[in-house]
Image (cartoon, coloured by chain):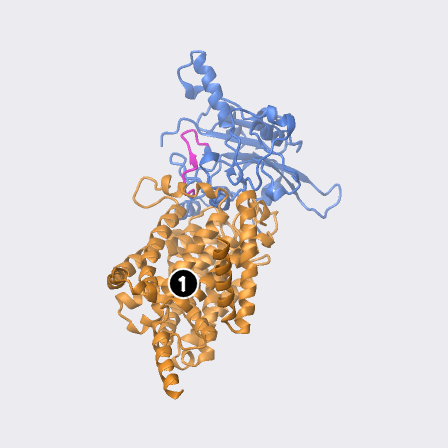
Chain colours: A orange, B blue
Amino acid sequence: MGELIKRAIDTIKAEFNSYSTGVKIALGVMFFLTAGFVIFGIQILFWGLGYTDMSNLYPFGQWIIGDLGLVSLGGGAFTTGFALYIFRNDKLEPIINSTVLIGFLCYLFTFIFLVFDIGQPLRAWFGYTYPNWGEHLMPTSMLTEVIWCLTLYFMILCVEIVPVALKHKVLDAIPALHYVGHYLHRIMWILAAAGTFLSFFHQGSLGGGMWDIMYGKAVWFRAHHIYFFVVIIGATAGGTAFMTLCAYLAGKVMKKEVVPAETFHSIAKISGILFVAFFIARLVDVVLMATRWVPLFDRSYISLQGGLYGLWLLVLEFLLLAVVIVMLLPKKNREQEKRFLIGIIAGVAAITTDKLITVLNGSSVPNFPWRDYIWYWPTIQEWFIMLGGLSVMAMIYMWCAKYLPLFPHAEKHAHHEGKSQAVAE
Amino acid sequence: MKMKRRWGMAIDLDLCTGCGDCALACAQENNMPVFEDDSDLPKRVQFLDLMKVSNDRDAAYPDVEVCYIPKMCQQCEGNDPKNPKPPCVSVCPVVATDVGDDGIVSQIWSRCIGCRYCQASCPYEARAFNWWKPRYEGDFKKSLNPDVSVASRGTVVKCQFCSHIWKRERDRAVAGGELDINAVTYTPACVAACPTRAMVFGDLDDPGSELSRLLSREKKRTFRLIHTIDEMKEKDEKKWKAMMQAKNYPNPKVYYLTSKAWIKEMMKFK
């Protein structure tokens, strides 16, 4: 046993030492955050949510923002899969393994954050056994729909990731596993289509429908599920930008070309077009909110944009959206590395800001005219669980990028480089 | 849904002295836990909150006026009283909360997973979450009400118009030979405790109930919490109809009465 632990520690040490100084520092910070994630996670699970800054007046906090953000950005997996397998955009082939892994991690950690966020984690299975389906086929509660749809899509992501894992040289050497991986890869378009179908629903329901259905709240309500459709477009746009950003960062850390430039340009173009659609949809949404839905509550839209997280966030979102469009839509901009990078970062930031507006501003709006806006600042427990969770995600991604064929293009490239180096020597 | 009862309440704010007896009686009847730091108001578990409202906080005597508004679950029913759709019920992912044919929005503590979606959807902040493990120190345990289950940590709880008292009264009536159990009436703890009789409870569908008679007699003094669409009905009925078609409104079954114009004015968002 002692020998095993020693070997594990040695492996971790060797792994740690294989990186450059900058990455080592980043890994150190991530290990620290992960340690906090474990410690405070135990505290929250065993002693309750009293240690958070959420309250009866502010029931949704940082973890819900994380859930919305992760699902929305993880939505890039289904968009890329759909573009590759259904629209046959073969330029996206080199990035698809990476997007599947990121999608898988985003959804996995959405579940993990949800487990922390609900007051009774041991009753989480009630969502499956006592679902609020109502009388008809469509679920009554948007959260029921989210629970079921997320679970089914997560299962699909699990199957989608199997061929990637099976391509590891040790596993691929076993003939049976090789064939399983091969045939799973061939039916991937079915999974991509099913994933798109499911993802459409839960992107809409978690990001939009869950909020616009609350007819008692002026800040969230929209009739006809308008926000439901707005956030689907947002997820496809932001998700593709996020997938691109992750692959770009992986290339920088690994110091090699993980994905060919034409893949980046192709996905950036898709993202740019989708961001134009999102910009228009969000603008229509804001205009409809201001002119139709909020006045039904005898309130004005601008009065809901006060407090600490009000109007500036809304302005910031539209500014970021404008930056993405300018940087990603014109060909000459997206093919210039710096502008391309600014574009995809702004895209991820715009979608994150959209989620901040939904949760942070939405929860802070006073329910009674004599009350002020509520101020929420996550406690150390909330910060560590959130950032620690993201660190674990990043580390799993880094490990997979190194040991699994996440980037087939880079491997081919490295192979050629290795050959030429050997020749030179 | 065929409604057997439509329990509602009226609170006369002109009679309310803000003594807090209603909140106390509610806490005792419904096994409210006491926490180490109960001054942490946003995390306190209580069904009945006594809100203090002032016409002008900066004004000095005699210009300053204060009003106490006892606020519990407003037992919303949505636009159609015959098919109640409170904002908090449809959102629950595990059917832990429901509205019965007595019009009461109920909650099963032991079914709740603590997602707090109902809390977020409630426009009246009427629901409380057990942020900490409920504690009942010393002799307090002996005074717990066996008719109300003690909630676990991490669950949402709410006022249910003390519906367990109705069940108790119905059991008693059946034992006494009564056949129509729905004919039985009851009084929630807060109403029974009010020393000035500011709170009246009854069936809104029964024109003979004390509540219905009070509301039809005092129409001008009546209003509902931040429910300004009621005013629209008087001002412009056509617009009111269009608004009711555009969306569901909470349509609470708790009414407030006052003769002070500033209190009604306070219900409007500026």
Q: Does residue A237 sit above or below B248 in this rendering?
A: below
Please check the rendered image and state whether residue B238 is part of the magenta-colored stretch, yes or no. Answer: no
Question: In the image, residue B209 lies at what x, y percent?
Answer: 49, 23
Q: Which residue is mark 1?
A: A102
Q: Quadrant of residue B137?
A: top right
Residue A67 or B262: which is nearer the viewer? A67
Q: Nearer the viewer, residue A390 or B250?
A: A390
Query: Quarter-wise, where is residue A136 in the image?
Result: top left
Magenta stretch bounds:
B92-104
Q: Is residue B201 above or below residue A300?
A: above
Q: Name the chief secondary structure element in magenta.
A: loop
Query: Farthest bottom residue?
Result: A424
Can residue A236 be seen in this snapshot? no
Callout 1: SS: helix
Q: Nearer the viewer, residue A130 or A333?
A: A130
Residue A44 located left or right of residue A324: right
